[in-house]
Amino acid sequence: MNPSKILCIGRNYTRHAVEMSSVIPTVPLVFLKPPSALINPGDEIVLPGVSSDVHHEVELVVRIARQGKSILREQAMSFVEGYAVGLDLTARDIQAEAKKKGYPWSVAKGFDTFAPLGAFSPVSDIKNPHALDISLSINGNVRQSGNTRDMIFDIPFLIEYLSGIFTLMPGDLIYTGTPEGVGPVEDGDELEAKISGLPVLNVRARRAG
Ligand code: MG
């Protein structure tokens, strides 16, 4: 089922904000990806010709169970259906240009195949989503390694904040941000994204054309 929306949080880990020379946010930085960006495990990431610097960002993804608006953080976890590993692919050169001009990030974040998503585990399988090792390897070399405890805004806070803006619908996804170590993805790379307790996400990248 396609989600009605994919909500993404930028700079939700301090050391990633620092590596991007970005200000550490005091409220969540929110952007959206189109559902047409989703791909499944085993599918291919297509690196678009208009970017020469597509970056990987491994993220814990939350799937919403039921409709909700203005959800209080105390109730927020009852709106979570499950968790998966996701990748927030980013055309960093296009994003840098957009930042400079004050333009939105929709293009940099929204290409087809820019939202690989692993299989979901039910919420009952994960005791504490804020204590999970999270990592990304390319061709067997670890590039990102962190822990979800280092999120600046935790999941209940994000659900409270986002549902104050958007009505959350069943199946909606929240990409909760990436730890440090982001870097380029090249033609032929094999990506392996892992979060402890969740099914591994494997995808390969190829250049368009
Ligand atoms: Mg991200």
Image: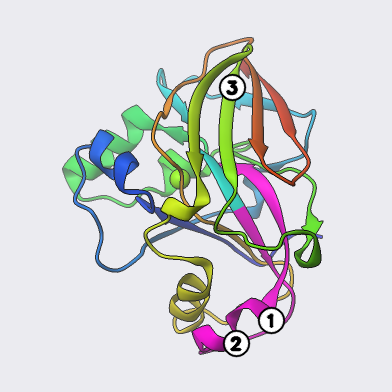
x and y percent of residue 1 in the render?
82, 60
Q: Amino acid at mark 3?
A: Ser
- How many residues crowd around disc 2 within 10 Å: few (fewer than 14), some, or many (20 or more)? few
Q: Residue at x 47, y 70 (%)?
A: 158
* CA distance separating discs 1 and 2: 6 Å
Q: Circle 3 sits on which residue?
A: 137
Q: Residue at x 48, y 38 (%)?
A: 146
Label 2 SS: helix
Quarter the C terminus occupies: top right
178 relative position to 95: left or right: right
Q: Amino acid at mark 1?
A: Ser
Q: Which image quarter: residue 53?
A: top left
Instruction: Mark 2 and ligand 1: say if the CB distance to the nearest ligand atom is below 8 Å.
Output: no
Q: Amino acid at mark 2?
A: Gln
Q: Residue at x 64, y 32 (%)?
A: 193
Dots 3, 2 in contact, CB < 8 A: no
Query: Of marks 3 and 2, which one's residue comes earlier in the chain?
Result: 2
Q: Quadrant of ligand 1?
A: top left
x and y percent of residue 127 in the render?
70, 63
Label 3 SS: strand
x and y percent of residue 117 in the render?
70, 44
11 relative position to 154: left or right: left
* CA distance separating discs 1 and 3: 32 Å
Region in magenta? 61-87
In this orientation, which residue lies closer to the viewer: 196 or 92?
196
> In the drawing, what numbered circle is on residue 75?
2
32 relative position to 52: left or right: right
Label 1 SS: helix
Q: Circle 1 sits on which residue?
A: 78
Tell me if residue 85 is in the magenta stretch.
yes
x and y percent of residue 184 in the render?
44, 20
